Image (tube, helix red, strand yellow):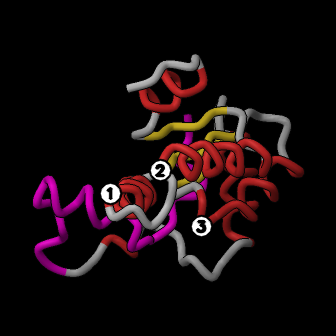
Amino acid sequence: MSYTAKYASSFYGPFREALDSNPRFGDKKTYQMNPANYREAVIEAGEDESEGADILLVKPGLPYLDIIRLLRDSSSLPIAAYQVSGEYSMIKAGGALKMIDEEKVMLESLICLRRAGADVILTYFALQAARSLCGEKR
C-alpha cells in the first residue's frame, strides 16, 4: 500500500496529541501534500503505480473525497481511504454532546468514502461499524 496522497492536514491532531508526537520544530509539510494541490495526487499515483504499488492510499479520507474519486477514475488499482483520528473524534464528540446521532453519522461517513471510490477503508470505527452492520446493539 502506497501513501499516494498523504495531505498535510489538521485532522491528524488528536492522534498527535495522544502520542505527544507533534513536531518539536518545523512541521511535516515538507513531505506531506499541500491540501490545495489536487494535481500532485495524480502525479504521485502514476509514480507509485510504476514503482509497483498494489493499493493507493488517500489520507485523510473525508476531506479528500474528490481525490479519492479522481484516483478511482484514473487508476485501475484499488483505492484505500484512511479515516484519521480527527474525523473519528469529531463524530465521537458530536455524538457524546448529543448534537448528532453518532451511529448514523459514522455509517454515513463510511458510505461517503465508499461512494467516492474507496475499495478499502481504514477507520477507528472498524469494530463499531462491523457491530452496527451485523445488527448488534451495545
Q: Earlier in the sequence, mark 2 or mark 3?
A: 3
Q: Earlier in the sequence, mark 2 or mark 1?
A: 1
* Marks 2,1: beta carbons within 8 A: yes
Residue pictured at 44% horizontal, 71% vertical? 9
Kind of residue at badge 2? Glu
Q: Mark 3 falls on what kind of element?
A: helix
Specify whether residue 23 is painted magenta. Answer: yes
Q: Mark 1 falls on what kind of element?
A: helix
The residue wearing badge 1 is: 96
Q: Mark 2 falls on what kind of element?
A: helix
Q: CA distance from mark 2 to mark 1?
A: 8 Å
The residue wearing badge 3 is: 63
Label 2 environment density (alpha carbons within 10 Å; few <14, some 14–19, many ≥20): some
The magenta region covers 1-25
Q: Is residue 31 left or right of residue 115?
A: left
Kind of residue at badge 3? Pro
Residue pictured at 44% horizontal, 31% vertical? 128
The residue wearing badge 2 is: 102
